[in-house]
């Protein structure tokens, strides 16, 4: 019983150390560059590409040739950069995705996690984006 207790304490210490190291690594690195991935709510998907500028305060987003636009930084909280999507005149997005949605981006290791806060009548979705190129 004593050996089991010692093993449990050692394992808990190793787990806490690994968890602490992983937490520190989560928010490392800038969002600067081009990122691509798939966002989903479990039933619908959105293939998206983001390009974030060097100042991390603006960029662009593209879902398709007709659904794209600019990004502007609204705020930063809890390690997330909150970017608002804007559609230019003539941009048409089907399926509820598009302008005025807010993409909440956070570095997770070498990737970026995106959780979308939709505008009215939009749809929530999230996913992991992978770096396509550094800017």
Image: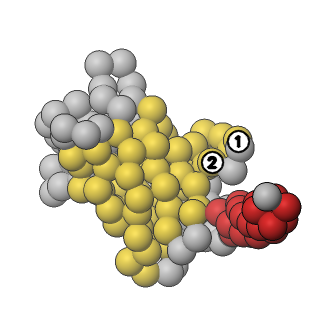
When the figure is inspected, residue 131 is found, relative to residue 106, above or below; the finding is: below
> Percent x, y for residue 43?
19, 38
> Percent x, y for residue 23?
71, 60
Give the image quarter of residue 4.
bottom right
Q: Which residue is mark 1?
A: 77
Marker count (numbered): 2
Q: Secondary structure at mark 1?
A: strand
- Mark 1: few/some/many CA within 10 Å (<14, 14-19, 20+): few
Give the image quarter of residue 98.
top left
- Is residue 8 rendered to the left or right of residue 113? right
Instruction: Out of 87 and 78, give the one closest to the viewer.
Output: 78
Q: Secondary structure at mark 2?
A: strand
Quadrant containing the N terminus in the rendered view? bottom right
Q: Residue at x 70, y 41 (%)?
A: 77
- Mark 2: few/some/many CA within 10 Å (<14, 14-19, 20+): some
When the figure is inspected, residue 78 is found, relative to residue 63, above or below; the finding is: above
Q: Which residue is mark 2?
A: 80
Q: Residue at x 39, y 25 (%)?
A: 119
- Is residue 43 rendered to the left or right of residue 88? left
Q: Residue at x 25, y 40 (%)?
A: 42
- Is residue 100 rendered to the left or right of residue 20? left
Instruction: Indicate how the structure is coloured in the image.
Output: secondary structure
The span from disc 1 to disc 2 (Cα, nearest Å) is: 5 Å
Instruction: Out of 134 and 10, give the one closest to the viewer.
Output: 10
The image's mark for residue 49 is none
Assess whether mark 2 and mark 1 are in contact (beta carbons under 8 angstroms). yes
Instruction: Out of 23 and 76, give the one closest to the viewer.
Output: 23
> Percent x, y for residue 108?
57, 63
> Percent x, y for residue 82?
57, 43
């Amino acid at each position: 019983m004593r050996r089991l207790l010692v093993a449990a304490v050692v394992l808990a210490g190793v787990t806490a150390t690994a968890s602490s190291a992983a937490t520190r690594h989560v928010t490392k690195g800038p969002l600067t560059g081009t990122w691509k991935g798939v966002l989903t709510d479990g039933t619908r998907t959105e293939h998206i590409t983001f390009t974030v500028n060097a100042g991390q305060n603006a960029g662009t987003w593209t879902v398709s040739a007709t659904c794209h636009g600019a990004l502007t930084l609204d705020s930063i909280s809890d390690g997330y950069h909150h970017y608002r999507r804007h559609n230019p005149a003539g941009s048409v997005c089907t399926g509820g995705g598009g302008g005025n949605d807010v993409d909440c981006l956070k570095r997770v290791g070498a990737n970026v996690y995106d959780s979308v806060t939709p505008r009215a009548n939009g749809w929530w979705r999230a996913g992991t984006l992978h770096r396509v190129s550094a800017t």
